[in-house]
Amino acid sequence: MFTLPWWIYLVLAGIVFSAYMMIKTAKEDQEVDMEYIEKEGEIYIQRMEEERARRKEQMQN
């Protein structure tokens, strides 16, 4: 098992750690993106409801 030089194991450990951090960061970025999309969607729906209420009010007058 220890037939390779020690630095090769260090490089392999670095590769595994980098892959783990990449996956973790990508997941966090996706969560942030989803929160932003949800927030923007709520703002859009609120604007639609306000516009609907404004038009309904204009129709009654």
Image (spheres, helix red, strand yellow):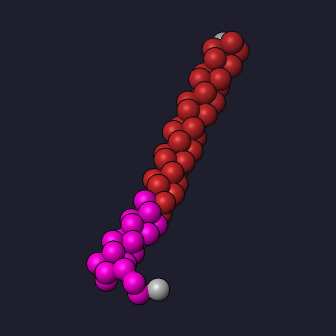
Q: Which residues are magenta?
A: 2-22
The residue that appears at 44% across and 63% down in the rendered structure is 19
| Viewer-proximal residue among 44 and 31 | 31
Measuring from the top left, give residue 45's x and y in whole percent.
Answer: 61, 34
Relative vertical location of residue 10 with respect to residue 36 in this rendering, above or below: below
Residue 21 left/right relative to 53: left
Q: Is residue 2 visible?
A: yes
Q: Is residue 57 visible?
A: no
| Viewer-proximal residue among 52 and 26 | 26
Predominant SS of the magenta segment:
helix
Viewport quadrant of the C terminus = top right
The residue that appears at 41% across and 87% down in the rendered structure is 2
| Viewer-proximal residue among 12 and 5 | 5
Measuring from the top left, give residue 8's x and y in whole percent.
Answer: 33, 75
Measuring from the top left, give residue 54's x and y in whole percent.
Answer: 60, 22
Relative vertical location of residue 8 with respect to residue 21 in this rendering, above or below: below
The residue that appears at 58% across and 40% down in the rendered structure is 42
Measuring from the top left, give residue 49's x and y in whole percent.
Answer: 63, 30
| Viewer-proximal residue among 60 and 4 | 4
